[in-house]
Amino acid sequence: METINRCPVCNESGFRAYLSCADHTVSHETFHIVQCESCGFRFTNPRPEEKEIGKYYEAEEYVSHSDSNKGIVNKLYQIVRNHTIKQKVRLVNKLIAKQKPVNRNLLDIGCGTGEFLHACNENGWQVTGTEPSTIARKNAESKYGIILFPQEKLFELDGKKFDVITLWHVLEHVHQLDKTIGQLTKLLRDNGVVVIAVPNCDSWDAKKYGKFWAAWDLPRHLYHFTEKHISMVFKKFGFRLEQVIPMKFDAFYVSLLSQKIKTGNPNLVLGFMNGMVSNIFANGNGYSSHIYIFRKNT
């Protein structure tokens, strides 16, 4: 385990205890979230070291790696994912429509089993992907013929430039936060865009479920972002926040998972109702998850 002594956002050293949660997916160990007394950012502390975090992903239930469709919640996830992938492809097409590059180059970091990359490739994009999980990389290759790089290869791509870089529910997993975002600035073309999707720990469903909120996902989620804090992080590296897009389906999926964690039963009706309520009250503190569009300042 490693202890973080400085806030990853503002670099101050004063923290207070915020919440303790169990790892409900793999280890069933208890982990802790602290809140920076200066800027209010919440992050997992202490946390597994980068070299040991892999064992906390070793479960068939971790669907982004295993591509499992066992159980009603995973089946629903697969159905919704197929729909949202089409939306994501339309989004990245729209983001560079004005630039009209000769070759559209996209990098997806932490691309799981490769569904989004495959869809982009089918849509005419030249794609590159990184993924830390050996299992997920093998699944992507066997299912789509896509060769993914191990995550550490991200820092060896300096000769390439990309129009769009995407991290779909990945940034919250990255140990080397500043180093990774710094590398994005090197890999992105002038006026290129970074697309980040992360959970929103100020959402209604986060408050409703408390320590049972599935999107805490300790210890795999190292950081727990809000719009304020993710904007602060990217501003340090010369990015401006251009757009915030709600991920309305996430409220339903996260509420179903949270209901299962809390009671042992997914309870589709109650989970769906809580997801709907979370979306209805999102004007206060935001949706369960957001997509953030950051454009590189030139």
Image (cartoon, rainbow, N blue to C red):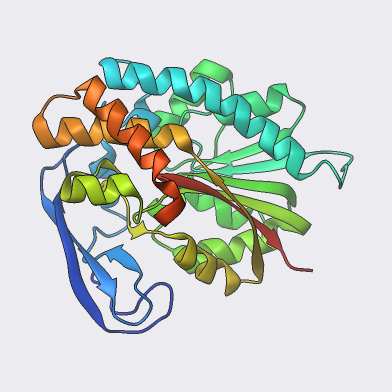
Q: Is residue 27 above or below residue 35?
A: above
On screen, residue 33 versus residue 79, left or right, reads left
**Where does the image place residue 239, in percent across and percent down from the top left?**
65, 66
Residue at the image position 48 percent from the left and 66 percent from the top = 228
Residue at the image position 19 percent from the left and 50 percent from the top = 210
Q: Nearer the viewer, residue 288 or 70?
A: 288
Q: Is residue 127 above or below residue 46?
A: above
The quadrant where residue 122 appears? top right
Q: Nearer the viewer, residue 137 or 231?
A: 231
On screen, residue 8 versus residue 46, left or right, reads right
Residue at the image position 49 percent from the left and 39 percent from the top = 247
**Where does the image place residue 165, in percent across and percent down from the top left?**
64, 48
The quadrant where residue 36 appears? bottom left
In the rendered image, which quarter contains the N terminus?
bottom left
**Where does the image place residue 3, in percent across and percent down from the top left?**
23, 71
Q: Is residue 175 above or below residue 137?
A: below
Q: Nearer the viewer, residue 107 or 265?
A: 265
